[in-house]
Amino acid sequence: MEDSHIESFLNEKLKLYISGAKEASHCGVDAYEKALALGRAVADSGAILLSGTAAGFPCWAAIGAQKAGGMSIGFSPAATEAEHIHSYGLTVEYADFIVYTGLGHSGCSLITVRSADAVFIGCGRGGTIEEFRIAYGESKPIGILEGEWTTDEVIQNIIEGSNLDNDKIVLDSDPKVLVKRTIELVRKGKEQHVYKNYIGVGERKSIVE
């Protein structure tokens, strides 16, 4: 692999997915501002924000990203815009464009997580916890935003109770610090991938497998 291709791989725009509750009345008084700040931090880092196009926490984060001049891509469980709006009750606002997966909520979550370089967990409930499990199973770096909500505590209990390896999991109450620390994990993983497959000892492999 040529050096220019390696440099391009290491410096490509990151895609950061933000998972959180659609109905956020239980999230506390600071949830809106924290979600905005998380989206803003993603945009300020130069990354692309991915979301599930739901209202509540993910929507607020997308608003924060757009206000900061960032790009936001939505992933929909619907197959069409009409189904997205009328059957799922989802918004088309605050996304620069939307990917209509047609896979329902579970399939859409899997595709979105797999498309991301890292996953951020905000205030959420069952769906957010399930996306944490998907992200962990896919070995994605995970940034968990601490706040007045209990989501972070629930996930910590899952980690401790299941003896999960947490070397790719970051917890922080400051959205800007959380994004910075999580991106460091992403960059570290990319560098290790390049060294193992293209620079280190052993057969050199193609970037396309």
Image: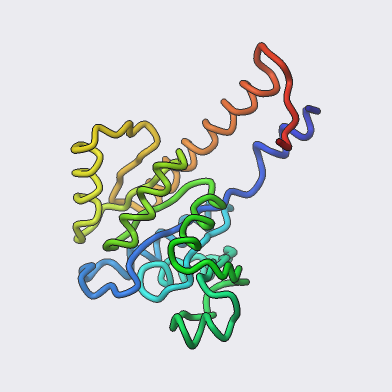
From the viewer's perspective, tell me whether residue 65 is left or right of residue 8: left
- Looking at this view, is 189 or 128 the one in front? 128
Looking at the picture, does residue 93 appear above or below residue 165?
A: below
Where's residue 53, x and y in %?
48, 72
Vertical placement of residue 80 versus 134, above or below: below
Residue drawn where x is 40% and y is 36% of the image: 168
Q: How is the image coloured?
A: rainbow
Image coordinates for residue 157, horizontal then vertical, percent: 19, 44
Find residue 150 and report its image quarter: bottom left
Observer-nearest of 33 and 133: 133
Q: Give the residue drawn at x 47%, y 36%.
A: 185
State the residue in front, 13 or 116: 116
Residue 70: percent from the left, percent from the top? Answer: 57, 63
- The residue located at (69%, 38%) in the rendering is 9
Left or right: residue 168 versus residue 10 is left
Above or below: residue 90 compared with residue 182: below
User: Could you say which is closer to the camera, residue 206 or residue 26?
Assistant: 206
For the N terminus, the quadrant is top right
Relative to 174, say whether 204 is above or below.
Answer: above
Residue 162: percent from left, percent from top = 23, 37
Q: In which quadrant of the rendered image does the C terminus lie?
A: top right
Residue extending furthest toward the top: 201
In the image, 39: left or right of 26? right
User: Residue drawn at (24%, 56%), measured in percent from left and top?
Assistant: 151
